[in-house]
Amino acid sequence: MDFELWWLFLIIPAVFALGWGASRFDIRQWRQEQLDAPRAYFKGLNFLLNEQQDKAIDAFIEAVQYDPNTSELHFALGNLFRRRGEYERAVRVHQHLLGRADLPTAERDRAQYALAQDYLKAGLLDRAEQSFRVLENIPAYSRESRMALLTLYERAHDWPNAIDVANALEDQKAGNFAPRRAHYHCELAAVAQVSGDYATVLHELTLAHHDSPDSPRPLIELARYHLKRGDVDAAFKNWAELARVAAQAVPLIAPEVAQFIQGMESSDQFSAQQQERWRQMALDLLDGAYAHQASLDILTAQVDIETDHQKRHARLLAYLEHHPSVVAAAELLNTMQTEDQSKETVAIRRTLERAAKPMDRYRCAACGFESTHYFWQCPGCQSWDSYPPRRVEEF
């Protein structure tokens, strides 16, 4: 019995010493890991500030390995992957976060939003739509999700859903979306025009004008609709309203007005009295708009409509006196070509016409994209109404 007690007295201190040593080892290891994790994190942050994204990603991956439960590092890593265009890796990071059962609700919603952004950037529009639809009812992400859905539906040309989302955003006091909705209705009218559904064309254009009375596009499209249907007086009424509510947009219709007047002369559809009345209405419309803004497009339309040769000369010379312009100079020489057909005049006219071509463009105020065609939505940056209705030379 004494022998057994003696061994017991030896075993107890030994077990205690072993336990204490093991605990010290675990503490040291834990402390080392705690030191290594922030060290790797700060290393990654330093690389990121120095725009060394490859090294930053490696450092953040190392930090995540030391502390896989740190959600902030996962978010940072996922955002880096998305910025670099590595959308598949970004999706995996955010899906891993969503797979954690211990993730708080706020962090789960944040991960869901990040995943939806990954899908949108990757072009997986169906998955992005599903993810953003889930977030619509979460107050913290409702507005951002609906804005993303609006962008998504615009890219997909899903105009009915875009109208619904724009209405919801306006209900949230997120801004005035009436001009955008007017564009959406005009796009629906364009679709109906292709299929020959003219009743729907008129319905959508009327809705667009009612939704945003000061927007120029519905009035321009309504005038085109009435001209195609032969209702010239209704078209002039739309043009007159455009000059009243959006005078800056008259240069967009000036070529169409001139084209109609010139085409009217070669047609026996209208009486001489009607032709003279509409010619005068067109000149009055353009003269009033020109007094508001001396636009090259309006000037060119005036010159095309004007029948008096001397008055055409006078209009161009008056413009050139106040606004030196290659385009106007070329137009002036064109009006003189019947008077002077010398080689020098022809050479100068051709040179001016060539020099005027690069200036005869529209430029997006948001991204600088240039085109000879006027766009309501920039094909470069997708901004609406970002093209001023003025040619590059007029800036």
Image: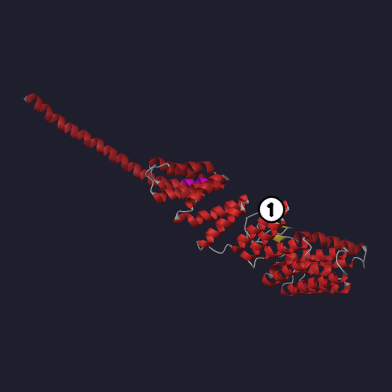
- Residue 21 included in the magenta stretch of the image: no
Q: How is the image coloured?
A: secondary structure
Q: Residue 338: x and y, percent?
A: 92, 66
Image coords of residue 99 (percent x, y): 42, 41
- What span is colored magenta in the figure? 77-81
Q: In the depicted view, which residue is nearer to us: 367 or 277?
A: 277
Closer-to-camera residue (306/273):
273
On the question of residue 388 being in view, the answer is no
Q: Is residue 177 visible?
A: yes
Q: Measuring 65% from the left and 54% from the top, which residue is drawn there? A: 380
Which corner quadrant holds the N terminus?
Answer: top left
Residue at numbered disc 1: 191
Residue 365: quadrant of the picture: bottom right
**Circle 1 — which element?**
helix
**Is 80 in the magenta?**
yes
Indicate whether 108 appears above or below 169: above
From the viewer's perspective, tell me whether residue 231 is left or right of residue 377: right
Q: Quadrant of the C terminus?
A: bottom right
Q: Residue furthest front?
A: 199
Residue farthest left in this picture: 2
Q: Residue at x 10, y 25 (%)?
A: 4
Percent from the top left, x then y, of residue 62? 43, 41
Which of the pair 171/324 is nearer the observer? 171
Which residue is drawn at the image coordinates 88% and 72% (left, top)? 309
Tag 1: residue type?
Answer: Val
Residue 22: quarter of image:
top left
